[in-house]
Image (spheres, grey):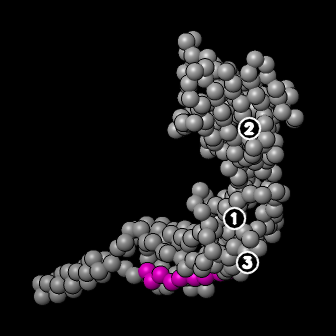
């Protein structure tokens, strides 16, 4: 007997599933436990064409056979709906046991038998994972972190940081089949959101942990404004240092202490010239670093003073000669 095989005749549609915070795209041969599946053929209804028999089977076990009456296989009562005009089959409330190869056989009235097949894989919804998130303060280069992600069932696990996959290497180690992510030592750039994504072909769940790394202070930078200091002018020294949390600042000049990131001199005098030392401290990391800035009078100011001295001397000589 000649058989007309339906190429791409069976299309699997799924419905009735919800996956975590959003819908996950599902392959045509995958479905979620509890959902509904429609095996839709490419046959278009034709009032001039009748079928003597339409039958569906899975793994060679009968699901439904329709001739002048319908015979439904055990376990499928109330779960299947057959479209006699197209041969499409709707299967409701699917279980993992519904996975397998589905076969369709149609006997037209006066034509050759039509056959087709497709596969279905039914997955349970993945469980919501749990992940430990460290409660202790994390300090750059001194702390390490173990993030553990646990879930039940069969799934694929992926570690993500700020939307980018985390892979083993350098300071990162993924162990115990992907269950544990170790960061050693931790760095400031590790601040951010870490996610453990659990998924199978039809569902997705995630666990999250936000890490904050305390660091610094780095060596301070001192900026003088204006860059050239003239006598009697206002001069400001500003000390900055990269740090989290923000550093506190202390100035030392001529063994005198002044707090704050800004050291202001309202009118520059000779007594203000010299070395200014800025200390930056982070009370969380316990680190303190410093830098020194030398404040000098500008050459213009010096040249002006010399010019005034020369002018005064010449005036004195002139008056003496007179």
153 in relation to 68, above or below: below
The answer to which quarter of the image holds residue 35 is top right
Of residues 240 and 202, the one nearer the viewer is 202
7 in relation to 267, above or below: above
Can you give x and y, in whole percent of width and height, for residue 51 in the image? 64, 20
Residue 292 painted magenta: yes
Residue 101 painted magenta: no
Of residues 311 and 60, the one nearer the viewer is 60
In this rendering, which labeled residue sits more in front, label 1 or label 2? Answer: 2
Q: Residue at x 81, y 51 (%)?
A: 127
Can you give x and y, in whole percent of width and height, for residue 37 in the image? 71, 34
Q: What residue sits right under mark 1 in the picture? A: 212
The answer to which quarter of the image holds residue 26 is top right
Q: For the C terminus, give its image quadrant.
A: bottom left
Q: For the N terminus, give its image quadrant.
A: top right
Q: Residue at x 82, y 26 (%)?
A: 71
Q: What residue sits right under mark 2 in the picture? A: 57
Q: Gap in Å between the C-alphas at discs 3 and 2? A: 60 Å
Can you give x and y, in whole percent of width and height, for residue 202 in the image? 69, 46
Q: What residue sits right under mark 3 in the picture? A: 143
Compared across the picture, whether 235 is left or right of 156 comes to left
Can you give x and y, in whole percent of width and height, for residue 271 in the image? 47, 82
Residue range in magenta is 285-295
Q: Secondary structure at mark 1?
A: loop
CA neighbours of label 2 inside 10 A, class few (<14), some (14 to 19), many (20+): some
Q: Gap in Å between the C-alphas at discs 1 and 3? A: 12 Å
């Amino acid at each position: 007997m000649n058989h007309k095989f339906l190429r791409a005749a069976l299309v699997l549609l799924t419905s009735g599933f919800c996956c975590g915070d959003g819908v996950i795209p599902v392959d045509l041969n995958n479905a979620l436990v509890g959902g509904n599946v429609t095996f839709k053929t490419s046959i278009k209804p034709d009032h001039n064409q009748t079928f003597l028999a339409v039958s569906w089977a899975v793994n060679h076990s009968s699901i439904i056979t329709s001739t002048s009456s319908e015979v439904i296989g055990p376990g499928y009562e109330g779960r299947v709906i057959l479209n006699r005009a197209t041969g499409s089959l709707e299967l409701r409330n699917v279980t993992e046991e519904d996975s397998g190869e589905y076969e369709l056989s149609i006997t037209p009235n006066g034509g050759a038998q039509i056959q087709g097949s497709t596969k279905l894989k039914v997955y349970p919804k993945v469980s919501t994972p749990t992940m430990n998130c460290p409660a202790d303060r994390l300090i750059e280069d001194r702390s390490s972190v173990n993030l553990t992600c646990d879930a039940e069932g069969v799934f694929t696990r992926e570690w993500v940081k700020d939307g980018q996959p985390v892979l083993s290497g350098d300071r990162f180690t993924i162990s115990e089949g992907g269950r544990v992510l170790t960061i050693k030592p931790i760095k400031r750039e590790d601040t951010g959101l870490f996610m453990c994504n659990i998924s199978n072909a039809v569902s997705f769940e995630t666990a999250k942990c936000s890490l904050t790394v305390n660091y610094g202070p780095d060596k301070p930078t001192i900026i003088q404004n204006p860059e050239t200091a003239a006598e009697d002018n206002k001069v400001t020294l500003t000390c900055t240092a990269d740090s989290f949390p923000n550093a506190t600042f202390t100035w030392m000049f001529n063994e005198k202490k002044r707090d704050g990131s800004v050291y202001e001199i309202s009118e520059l005098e000779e007594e203000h010239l010299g070395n200014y030392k800025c200390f930056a401290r982070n009370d969380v990391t316990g680190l303190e670093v410093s830098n020194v800035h030398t404040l000098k009078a500008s050459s213009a100011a010096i040249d002006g003073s010399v010019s005034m001295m020369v002018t005064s001397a010449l005036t004195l000589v002139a008056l003496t000669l007179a």
